[in-house]
Amino acid sequence: MSPDPQKTFYLETFGCQMNVHDSEKVIGTLVHEGYRQVQTVEDAGLVLYNTCSIRDKAEQKVFNRLNDYKKYQKQGKKFAVLGCVAQQEGEKIFERAPYVSMVCGSASYKNLPQMLVQIEAGNQRVTGLDDRETEDCFETEFTARTNPHRGYITIIEGCDKFCSYCVVPFTRGKERSRTTESVLAEARQMADLGYTEIQLLGQNVNSYKDPAGKRTFAELLAAVGEVPGIRRVRFTTSHPRDFGRDIIDAIDAVPTLCDHVHLPVQSGSDRILNAMQRLYTREQYLDRIAWMKSAKREISITSDIIVGFPGETQEDFADTLSLLDEVGYDAVFAFKYSPRPNTPSLALEDAIPDEEKIRRLEVVNTRQRAIQTANYKKYIGAISEVMVEGRNEARAQWMGRTSQNKTLNFTAPADAPPTIGSYVQVRATASFPNSLLGELVV
Ligand code: 5AD
Ligand code: SF4
């Protein structure tokens, strides 16, 4: 459909990679419906806000932002709230922000074209709030990917794990896997368009089950890695309980599968892991780490940590610190526990004072920084293949990423600049806690 100059939209996105990719699909859908994307709220007829509710006072932040939008309502703009806060707060959003005319959770995006028609017809209360039991996936051929070289593919939506702190099973519904055939068709199509890196996405990719019954996650991973033209395949996020050794076997067997695994541990204390309903022990987690460490290639391991979960004692916290030392992660994303609506741990008293949570967070980050400083130092002198991602003019450096997902900034001769999206060899000459510096090998 050709764009109608009257139909313009502005979309703002918060949250995880799933949300970022959902937005790419929402944009593709809107464009297919004849809308044109604009870069400011002022220029837009329809303002969409894709929200995240994972931590902190997410709902409050959304309502504050909607308040900022209030001033535009007289100009006849329409507002839509999408994503996890939309699903969580539902029709309450209309009560608190009456100028919003659409509230839609991620499990209902496939209905967006009909919902857009309703908004245009002047309906003030358009909802897409499918419940947790929905079987629907948001598959579309109109994904508007922003990067021409690397792109996401959703393989599984929703989550059935119910970790006691986590809002996702309530905002994204139950687990639904796409068929292997449809994932592979999308990968082939991306390869034809020139993409060389694919990142498979899901809240828990390890519990992927081909609805046609053909392939496991590890088999799907290997099959995507074998699509001609694809040079790198990543996947996120993994859950230790479902992380099988066959994934490491696949990484060993298929060179295009990146040597990086993000395996969130959340805590190093068995008592806290149990209270979090994580369904594994420290020892079982460390078994998986041992598989990775015995792989043929060195696998870079990264994780998420929550500090200050209800009842976390100094001893429990010390267990988390010792686990950081034992694993030697290349990156850790650490968060202060925050109580979330609907979650089982909401019933537990959030008694650890914020100052103590902040202190624990700082201790984790300081410890982890020292670990990474040592890890990254080992690469000085080594040559790695990087995919060139950008240029920092001020520093006269190029930026690339290794298969291990490490950032490698590098210099290159002015008369032979690398092209964005190409793969080049870079020798590391200096290291930092989060990146390497190097020079192009010519
Ligand atoms: N409080 C703090 N951190 C949380 N995470 C998820 N839920 C919460 C919460 N209620 C963190 C976990 C997860 C990451 C995406 O966000 O570490 O792995
Ligand atoms: Fe945020 Fe979780 Fe929703 Fe992603 S799935 S947008 S992290 S609440």
Image: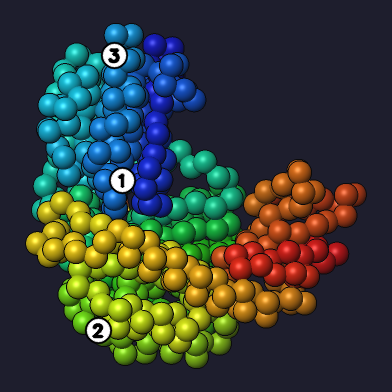
Residue 168, percent from left and from top: 23, 56
Q: CA distance from mark 3 to mark 2?
A: 52 Å
Quadrant containing the N terminus in the rendered view: top left
Q: CA distance from mark 3 to mark 1?
A: 23 Å
Which residue is pictured at 25% across the width and 84% down the height?
270
Q: Earlier in the sequence, mark 1 or mark 2?
A: 1
Which residue is pictured at 75% across the width and 69% down the height?
430
292 versus 94 height, above or below: below
Q: Earlier in the sequence, mark 3 or mark 2?
A: 3
Q: Which mark is residue 52?
A: 1
Quadrant containing the C terminus in the rendered view: bottom right
Q: CA distance from mark 1 to mark 2?
A: 29 Å
Is label 2 in a helix, a strand or a loop? helix
Residue 143, percent from left and from top: 42, 41
Q: Earlier in the sequence, mark 3 or mark 1?
A: 1
- Report the front residue among 192 and 401: 401
| Residue 293 placement, left or right of 14 | right
- Kind of residue indicated by mark 2: Asp
Q: Is the residue at mark 3 in contact range of ligand 2, meaning its CB lies under 8 Å from it?
A: no
Q: Is the residue at mark 1 in contact range of ligand 2, meaning its CB lies under 8 Å from it?
A: yes
Answer few, some or many: residues within 10 Å of disc 3's Cα (few below 14, many 20 plus, some between 14 and 19).
Answer: few
Is label 3 in a helix, a strand or a loop? helix
Answer few, some or many: residues within 10 Å of disc 1's Cα (few below 14, many 20 plus, some between 14 and 19).
Answer: many
Q: Quadrant of residue 125?
A: top left
Q: Which residue is mark 2?
A: 270
Q: Quadrant of residue 413?
A: bottom right
Q: Which residue is mark 3?
A: 73
Q: Quadrant of residue 64?
A: top left
Which residue is pictured at 69% across the width and 54% down the height?
399
Is label 1 in a helix, a strand or a loop? loop
Question: Residue 266: in sight, yes or no?
Answer: yes
156 versus 14 height, above or below: below
